[in-house]
Amino acid sequence: MKTLHFCLPLALTALLAAGPALARDNWITTWMASPQPTWGNELPLPTRIPETLTDSTIHQQLRVSLGGSQIRVVLSNEYGKQPLLIGAARVAAMTGSGQILTFGGQQQVSIAPGETRTSDPLALTVPDLGDLRVSLYLPQRTPLTTFHWDGKQTAFITPGNQVDAPRPEGQEQLEARLFLSDILVDASPDSRALVVLGDSITDGNGSTLDRNRRWPDFLAQRLASKKVAVLNGGISGARLLQDGMGASALKRFERDVLGKPGVKSVVLMLGINDISWPGTAFAPNAPLPSLDELIAGYRQLIDQAHRHNIRLIGTTLLPFEGALEGSIIEHYHSPQKEQLRQALNQWIRTGQAFDAVIDFDRMTRDPRQPSRLLPLIDSGDHLHPGDEGNRAMAEGVELKTLF
């Protein structure tokens, strides 16, 4: 007989621990960056971040989806091996001076390995699709073990405690997220959230840096007036069944979906890396998954969502013939992999397992070569959509299918 283990989602636990006053508020997640562990030579792509920082301030910019009258910031030390000490933290609108964040009334916070901490509520009105900057001061030697690799937003590192610096430009720059996991807002009672759980296509690889042109960004623009927050749960290199450049969807569904306050729907856009990685530098000796294994993975997530009264929308997988040719990642596509993608897409369309289906394959394929992306969609690597491709995908979603 199996022992059943029950746990409150992390963000919800943090809210309850903050006291009964917050129960009268309507806290909803409005932005997220899924944490990943850093890696060494086991993956063919560099992390593009320093190994450690000491006596340094990280300035990270982001755009929320839904606004509110108060905010809270969630920091993660999920993959840390030692406590993460934040000496000071500040959040600011891009045009404002900002305010200091506190954690349990203290400006300094130590986050244990494997844990997250949510800041105290801060009275800061943020408009829908508003831009914020979060500055974190690291006073001691800090290994950068928890990050989000493909942030698609320039972050700045400055020496010393410069959380008050109005313009951190001109210092060391990177494109990853460091320790920053979520932004919550106190939104109107009828607000709700939608998570897009995906891979690099959702994460925005192929879109323009610092321009917020991932396809979930364009979807957020369509849904803001309807009081819906769109949360980008993409991880470049993510897979459905196995860990990739981050935890598998089966492992992170609790954290990235069930643990986010206000989530009512999920768009699931995963599987292309499960199909394409075997035989490449990512997984040179791994076999292709079977169609039944992929379907079983989808069904497991559907069951989890439905047990929590969350709607789960599936998407077909985009064409990828010619993907990453000439790069360090060869053999990404093959006739056998294409056959598996087609079979999986057919099941997604006809299996009636999802609450609804978004057929991105039909939206993005070249009618003359259906196994390839339409040139207007393609960023140039034959795998990821560019800016206009992301826009077309978001505009092609029928909003009535989402809730």
Image: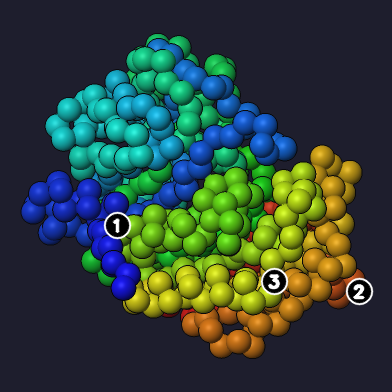
What is the quadrant of the N terminus in the image?
A: bottom left
The CA span between labels 1 and 3 is 32 Å
Q: Identify the residue shown where x is 52% and y is 30%.
A: 155
Instruction: Give the spatial CA distance, label 2 vs label 1.
Output: 47 Å
How crowded pointer 1 is (Cα within 10 Å; few <14, some 14-19, many 20+) is rated as some
Percent position of residue 350, x then y = 64, 88
Residue topped by disc 3: 290
Give the structural element (helix, strand or loop) at label 3: loop
Check the image and report above or below for 232 versus 219: above
Is residue 388 visible to us here? no
Picture coordinates of residue 236 (x, y %)? Answer: 62, 48
Residue 287 or 214: which is nearer the viewer?
Answer: 287
Query: Marks 2 and 3, how far apart in space?
Result: 28 Å
Of the two numbered discs 2 and 3 in the rendering, the one whose residue sits closer to the viewer: 3
Q: SS for tag 1?
A: loop
Image position of 44 with respect to 106: above or below? below
Which comes before the other along the chain, label 1 or label 3? 1
Point 56% across, 75% down: residue: 296
Q: Is residue 46 left or right of residue 76?
A: right
Question: In the rendered structure, are the residues bearing label 2 and label 1 in contact, judged by CB atoms less than 8 Å apart?
Answer: no
1 vs 3, front mark? 3
Circle 2 residue: 368
Q: In the figure, residue 287 lies in which quadrant?
A: bottom right
- Which residue is most to the right? 368
Residue 9 circle label: 1
Amino acid bearing label 3:
Ser
